Amino acid sequence: MAAAEPVPPIGAALSRLAAEDPDRSAVTCDGRTLTRGQLEAVTNRLARAYAELGVAQGDYVTIALPNSIEWVQAVVATWKLGAVPQPLSARLPDAEYSDLLDLRPRALLVGRADPRGVVTSVPGDFSPRADLSDAPLPEAVSPTLKSMASGGSTGRPKLIEAGGDSRFQGDLVAAIMGNLPTDTQLVSVPLSHNTGFTSATMALATGQHLVLMPRFDPESFLRLITEHRVNYLATVPTIMQRLLPVYRADPDSFDLSSVRRWWHLAAPCPPTVKEAWIEILGPEVVWELYGGTELQALTFISGTEWLTHRGSVGRVVSGEMKVLDDDGADCPPGVVGEIYMRPRPGSQPTYRYIGSTAKTRDGWDSLGDLGWFDDEGYLYLADRRVDMFTVGGRNVYPAEIENALSEHPAVLSCLVVGVPHEDLGQVPHALVHASRDGTALDESAVAAFVAERLADYKVPRSVEFVDTPLRDDAGKARRTAVRDEVLARRTAGVREL
């Protein structure tokens, strides 16, 4: 039996794809398209330019750019040198940007200068010298495929090196996720977020046509699917919720029939939002994944399964998971506890933290999520441990209240936090981003709507209306920071009285 062909590093894999079909579209963004051949030539030159600036195999290259062809070029050039791409949001405050840079030395910053004045930087539109060769480079393996920033929700920044080295098994990953090399894939979430980075990596490594959104916009999202006949995408619940009113207002303007697999992940999805997309696309199209950047374990669930296990995030398909109580004992089916996970025994470690340590118990890791298994092995999420609060001694999970609020047709996004109460300890406070379609929605209407669906102690005692989305395009909310801001406003209000 012949030995399997070794997996090439992703930079070399892209060179092979370019040689096979140089004229096939590789990446499109904002009306501009690069073919495989064009991407190969520009990234070979860019990699040589980075090398002249001191980037070597194993070095970190931080890429602080919005979604763009320039972002793709910078990451691919980094891989071709065997260096490690480390994406950061282009909109990070200087203080947070500096804190992340302090965690590990970098060889180069792309798109943003170093506020500390330490690391060499180049602008996002940096062009290599014209005399640099665009010929393929020698194969070089990056020691880790990516290093993702995390920790904003807890206030302690960290980096997560995950995904193994850059010998990325794109065909295997694509087969597991249900996409094909001939697919066109839409990425609407920030590439600095693990969902966006992983989706783009899969598309590039398997030769798909990658269509990027510079920034999410509901109508543009739907039109890109229609225009490019998108087959596959991975997105987040907050985007799914923002899409619904636009699609429902004029469904005949958009053709979503090309979509064969629509994944959502990264945050719990309100059941009414998921149900709506199952109705629009079909249950065989809508899939959900639960897991972390760390990749210790994953669950999958199809829309078909979800309809018979409403609210579940699926069964374990990779690694192992269990639910433990505060004493470390296994929780029986239906009992909420903390979710712990690990790779299957004998597997290689799947991640490494820089700037933090994992919460572990006897070799099992926790990401801080609470949930329970049913007696069929389907997992359900309650919330994150740090987000739970108690009302008169009873546990309240903000996600449950947010799911109830999301059923209101005028609610575009919402967030619930616990605030102090003299008698009950804490009570729910809701922030609501509502549509401007004329639907009457005030504090009493919010409370009445939730009261029809949940117990009285879960009904928000106070409501704030906001004009902007409460979660970013990656579906993330900095709940701790939001709660601190709410408390500061309430304190200031008391002082003004």
Image: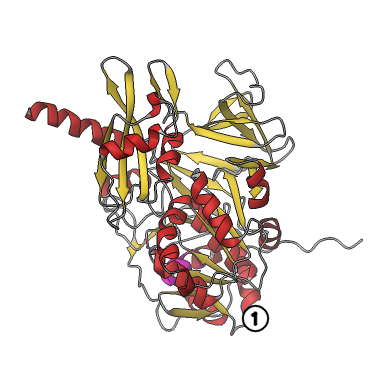
Quadrant of the image occupied by residue 221? bottom left
Picture layout, residue 273 above or below residue 203: above
Q: Is residue 416 left or right of residue 297?
A: left
Q: Position of residue 155 (x, y in %)?
A: 36, 36
Give the residues drawn in magenta, as a range.
65-76
Quadrant of the image occupied by residue 457? top left
Picture residue at 64% right of the left edge, 55% below the top:
283
Membership of 115 in magenta stretch: no
Picture residue at 37% right of the left edge, 55% below the top:
89
Residue 449: in sight, yes or no?
yes
- The rendered magenta stretch, by its main secondary structure, is classed as helix
Q: Position of residue 380 (x, y in %)?
A: 59, 35
Q: Position of residue 186 (x, y in %)?
A: 52, 67
Picture layout, residue 128 above or below residue 402: below
The amino acid at mark 1 is Ala
Q: Nearer the viewer, residue 190 or 258?
A: 258
Q: Is residue 77 left or right of residue 6?
A: left
Q: Nearer the viewer, residue 249 or 475?
A: 249
Q: Which residue is mark 1?
A: 19
Residue 60: in sight, yes or no?
no
